[in-house]
Amino acid sequence: MTILVLAEHDNTALSETTARTLACAGQIGASIHILVAGKDCGAVAEEAATLSGVEKILLADDPLYQHALAEPLAELILVLAPSYDAILAPATANGKNVLPRVAAKRDVPQISDIVAVETPEIFLRPIYAGNALQRVEAKGFQKIITVRASAFKPVAKANAAAPIESILPARDPRLSVFQNEVLSQSERPELTAARIVVSGGRGVGSKENFALIERIADRLGAGVGASRAAVDAGFVPNDYQVGQTGKIVAPELYIAVGISGAIQHLAGMKDSKLVVAINKDENAPIFAIADYGVVGDLFEVLPEFERALDNAGKPA
Amino acid sequence: MKVLVPVKRVIDFNVAIRVKADGSGVERTNVKMSINPFDEIAVEEAVRLREAGIASEVIAISIGPRECTETLRTALAMGADRGLLILAEQDIEPLTVAKVLKAVVAEETPQLVILGKQAIDDDCNQTGQMLAALLDWPQGTFASKVDIKNGRISVTREVDGGLQTVDLKLPAIVTTDLRLNEPRYASLPNIMKARKKPIAEKTLADYGIDATPRLKILDVREPSKRRTGERLGTAADLVGKLRQAGVI
Ligand SMILES: Cc1cc2nc3c(=O)[nH]c(=O)nc-3n(C[C@H](O)[C@H](O)[C@H](O)COP(=O)(O)OP(=O)(O)OC[C@H]3O[C@@H](n4cnc5c(N)ncnc54)[C@H](O)[C@@H]3O)c2cc1C
Ligand SMILES: Nc1ncnc2c1ncn2[C@@H]1O[C@H](COP(=O)(O)O)[C@@H](O)[C@H]1O
């Protein structure tokens, strides 16, 4: 099996989702190449080359790929596609955007968002917001797969770097033009890579109050997440949303504050190792899946939590 | 210009899913079915474009069993002009749906197709992108804002880092995210009016498309359940437990 993995990056650094997708690829086959497409992204290729299990890096460094627009990127993958038995991408916004385009042109179905590899042809994927798991077999055709990165541990660094091969850009389909982007600036760990995530919901009440959540997060070196209700109410930007239609996270610790626990939210965090819920409604569904629950008003519990962290001194 | 809106009939998002004991799928009998929430947003957006004088006609289309007529009626009650039901008995894969939609696009020649970004049953998030590829059209996926001017469409997309805006040549594909708009409730008079709007009927065979699934679903399982944990009295207890667990 020869496998192509699409790297996720911002032209400067490689996203951890790539190393996780690589772990998934390693369970499907042994000969793995990574495609790094972007602009001035040589550093990303070098970083990718150090990942364990990679045979070589294909680097397409061209302005055409600067913003990962689906139309030109799909053309590039399609040029490479005939040489591979499987093509994988992390199920990020970019992966979800481009890979079905490739699958349709290859006339094969796509297997979305897999969470486990049973055999190189049998995969597990969540359906109905994770309320059921489907076991699917893909036999007799090229496998085009998006991977739920949070379900796989990132591969380690290799001892020696894999070779980097520059490739030419593909045809420009001239269908779309990048206009602009508004990216959230944050010093905090990226949500899907954070070891701890603190999320706030509608219960937090306002944008100003969200500072309480952020303060706790900073104390713990955590990423900050939110429910859809909190995003819709404008407390935080859209990219904070955790859930069926937001980001999927599985940190060591997930703290849900003022979040009721709708299935669409649980879909994005119920694979976290330890779940803590803080909610004033003792019947909130979030408590049914929480390892530790505190029933109380978050405006009292959070300051108390901060004080308790102070009293116990710095984490060991 | 015409706008095409594919709408899928799915189990209502409020229903607690039950996996069948024999592993053959999820229970669908006597379960409330609704229009896929993202498709409701797609219908709303299309109707607003017509109300703004940008679109001339909104055509809703659903592929599935006869009951999809109800899904189409919902779209018509919201303001779609006519419906197209394409009868299919079995579940069909996104790639097949995309092929059927391509054939409908050839008949109807719309300038815009607005789909949901994902169906909340299969959670595939593929069909719109696949249709775009089959047509060689540009795509604006996960849209939270669209703006049509001078034969082009500007789409603001919800991406992992924030928002990205792309400018696409028409005809184009748009897939909706939750914040694109808030769908209206259909008023009673509009529900009555929708009963008189035409719904054409076809079958998959009319399009000569082989709908045999290529992916084989071996079984559907219940995910492992999280057990309910402990209630703690104070935040100090919580800090103690988290320290003990070694996570902070
Ligand atoms: C198609 C679809 C997709 C969706 N996708 C997502 C998704 O990806 N992510 C997502 O999160 N949601 C999603 N939703 C929405 C989801 O159904 C819920 O509406 C949403 O998660 C509710 O957010 P919430 O828990 O913050 O708000 P609410 O349900 O309103 O809960 C607020 C909670 O805060 C508590 N509270 C209030 N005040 C306080 C206080 N002072 N102290 C302590 N507790 C307090 C309340 O007791 C309550 O439990 C989706 C819905 C649909 C239809
Ligand atoms: N059977 C169907 N009938 C009509 N539209 C569909 C059907 N299946 C998928 N779609 C459309 O494709 C979108 C994405 O579906 P999916 O790729 O399955 O997640 C949906 O939101 C619908 O707009």
Image: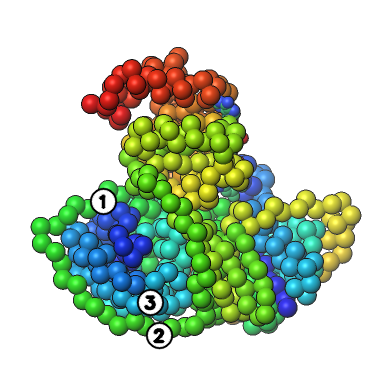
Identified at 30% across, 54% down, the residue is: A16
Q: Residues within 10 Å of mark 1 (few under 14, many from 20)?
A: some
Residues indicated by labels 3 and 1 sit on the same polypeptide chain: yes
Indicate the secondary structure of the residue bearing disc 3.
Answer: helix
Q: Earlier in the sequence, mark 2 or mark 3?
A: 3
Q: Earlier in the sequence, mark 3 or mark 1?
A: 3
Most foreground residue, A283 or B235: B235
What is the image's colouring?
rainbow
Frontmost of labels 2 and 3 is 3
Mark 3 neighbour class, 10 Å CA radius: few under 14, some 14 to 19, many 20 or more: few
Displayed quadrant of residue A314: top left
Residue indicated by mark 3 = A63
- Spatial CA span between label 2 and label 1: 33 Å
The quadrant in which the N terminus of chain A is found is bottom left
Asked if badge 2 and badge 1 are on a common chain, one would say yes
Disc with the residue nearer the chain's start (2 vs 1): 1
- Split into quadrants, the picture shows ligand 1 in the one at top right
Gap in angstroms between the C-alphas marked 2 and 3: 13 Å
Q: CA distance from mark 3 to mark 1?
A: 29 Å
Residue A146, quarter of the rendered image: bottom left
Which of the pair A123/B117 is nearer the observer?
B117
The spot of residue B109 in percent (x, y) is 68, 81
Q: Amino acid at mark 3?
A: Pro
Q: Is residue B42 left or right of residue B118?
A: right
Residue type at mark 1 is: Pro
Which quarter of the rendering shows the C terminus of chain A?
A: top left
Badges 2 and 3, same chain: yes
User: Which numbered disc covers residue A154?
Assistant: 1
> Camera-side residue: B86 or B99?
B99
The residue tagged 2 is A171
